[in-house]
Image (cartoon, helix red, strand yellow):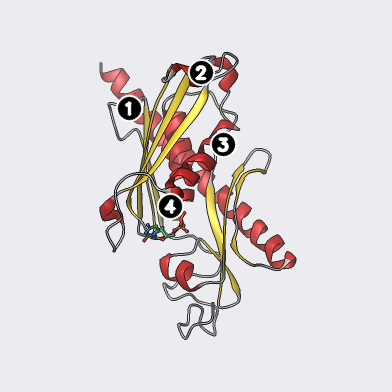
Amino acid sequence: MDSDIVMVDEKGKRADGREADELRPMKIEAGVLPNADGSAYLEIGKNKVLAAVYGPRECHPRHLQDPTKAIVQCKYNMQSYSVGDRKRPGPDRRSVEISKIISEALESVILTELFPRASIDVYIEIMQANAGTRCAGLSAASVALADAGIPMRDLVPSVAVGKADGKLLLDLNKEEDNFGEADLPLAIIPKTDEVVLLQMDGHMTKEEFDAAMKMGVAACHQIYEMQRDALRRRYSVTEEEEVEE
Ligand code: CDP
């Protein structure tokens, strides 16, 4: 989309001061909800996301049970107060789509065959949104699953790469997303670089797409380190508590 808004200056700096390939400031904390089997809180830029995991537990309704493996049921929900214009509460087409793609990405890493007939329920709540919430939600959810002790092949870091002012930009913020030309959310399994989520809104040339994927995969590896750090911190706290008891 053409607009008069300048998103990248002549030195290549973005309006929020970032370089083209720089993530927004990010923070992850595991184990924030004692009631849940596993949980995580994640901030990236102005996004604030909570993920809670319950299970493996008996699958309801029972007709959804799979006798060969557990099913992964993710509910992505954007709170009414998470965006400037109040969002109508409850599911809509967008949240149903996001829930489905996140469930599928998580299902590809969870060892579901270990839990026949069970359900692994993942709740993602967006408390504040500023573009990139599906990626933030998925990154948080995989930490929450690990916190719940659910056997997985790996964590799933996720980020979007976009195009604005004709330039590829990592981790678009809301303004860049609104006025930019393309948005490419992706998620990988870092051990193999297998892509488990890939969407595209807008257009890129093949060369741009290849460069965007490279940028996104590198950033996913950065997020992966932060996910692992969050779990290490959580583990050492638990260990101290166990010693005290
Ligand atoms: O959040 P994500 O980038 O994964 O999904 P999107 O559909 O591309 O939405 C981009 C951004 O638009 C969200 O992060 C919100 O900040 C905003 N949005 C909104 O203000 N109201 C909605 N009903 C949906 C999205």
Q: Is mark 4 within 8 Å of ligand 1?
A: yes
What amino acid type is highlighted by mark number 4?
Thr
Give the quarter of the figure containing the C terminus. top left
- Residue that badge 4 annotates: 133
In the drawing, what numbered circle is on residue 36? 1
Left of 156 or right of it: where is 51?
left
Q: Image point 51% across, 78% down: which residue?
A: 8
What amino acid type is highlighted by mark number 3?
Glu
- Residue that badge 3 annotates: 104
Of labels 2 and 3, the one closer to you: 2
Q: Earlier in the sequence, mark 4 or mark 1?
A: 1
Q: Earlier in the sequence, mark 2 or mark 1?
A: 1
Q: Residues within 10 Å of mark 2 (few under 14, many from 20)?
A: some
Q: Is residue 27 above or below residue 112?
A: below
Query: Separation of disc 2 and disc 1 at Cα?
Result: 22 Å
Quarter for ligand 1?
Answer: bottom left
Residue 11: where, in percent of width, then height? 54, 82
- Proximity of marks 2 and 1: CB atoms separated by less than 8 Å: no
Of labels 3 and 1, the one closer to you: 3
